[in-house]
Amino acid sequence: TKTENKRIKEIINAEYILGNPNYTAISFGGYREKTRDKCPSVEELKEDMKILSAIDIKIIRTYYTQQFPHAERVLQAIQELKKEDPSFEMYVMLGAWIECEGAYTSTRNHAKENIKGNQSEVKRAIELAKEYPEIIKILAVGNESMVHWAETYSVYPKVILKYVEQLQNLKKQGELSSDLWITSSDNFASWGGGSTEYHSNDLIKLINTVDYISMHT
């Protein structure tokens, strides 16, 4: 019935799918060339989604929101597949890329952030989360952005914390769904499992502010 379908849709959230053996996840980049400047088309990504679905993948993870059109086309591909077949299931952990000032240059400054780029990434993540609430279930602020061996772009936890707090406040205000989980995807060391150089009050605050810890091991 319509009521039952509505109830099922309501429980398909991050809390329900994460750690659920029926919802296998994979990190996804659908690039067919050796450069991200040549982004696959929506039709090509629909092919990928069908293949992933056929092998029981139901959650994919992306890395950027606006530096490349990949994530946006992935979302469009999933939406079109859902329109063609309402039973089609694929959910997204949307990543927002975070980097330091002068990332990938000889003048990089890890104590400061690329504020224009980072704000644009998070702003687009917010817009996409509102546009595709039935698909995006998790927002990840940064990918291995705090681990020190990411020496070409890493930032300190205070940068990640700032954006996680921003997103959590939008949830409290009702601008984003309360079911949308916020995290940062990082190495075990940067979550406090490494040497004491990683330990800081900002990291403790971050651990207490995310909805769950997305840890790379």
Image: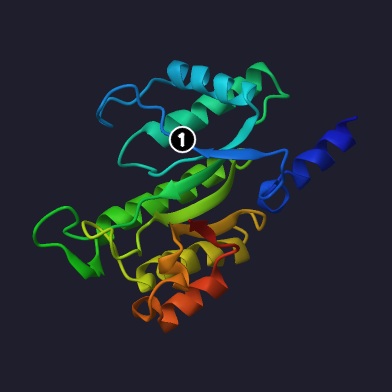
Residue at the extreme right:
1
Q: Secondary structure at mark 1?
A: loop
Residue 111, above or below 51: below
Where is residue 23 drawn, in percent x and y? Answer: 68, 39
Locate the N terminus and report the quarter of the image it occupies. top right
Residue 71, above or below 52: below
Q: Is residue 30 left or right of residue 129?
A: left
Where is residue 113 drawn, in percent x and y? Answer: 26, 65
Q: Is residue 40 left or right of residue 75?
A: left
Nearer the observer, 6 or 208? 208
Q: Which residue occupies 33% across, 51% down?
A: 120
Where is residue 90 drawn, in percent x and y? Answer: 62, 32
Residue 191, above or below 127: below
Q: Is residue 48 left or right of residue 85?
A: left
Q: How many marks?
A: 1
Q: Which residue occupies 42% across, 67% down?
A: 189
Q: Quadrant of residue 87?
A: top right
Where is residue 5 drawn, in percent x and y? Answer: 83, 34
Classed neighbour count for the residue bearing mark 1: other residues with Cα under 10 Å, few (<14), some (14–19), many (≥20): some
Q: Which residue occupies 39% across, 43% down?
A: 65
Per the image, the residue denoted by label 1 is 28
Q: Quadrant of residue 15?
A: bottom right
Nearer the observer, 213 or 172? 213
Q: Is residue 136 left or right of residue 71?
A: right
Q: Amino acid at mark 1?
A: Phe
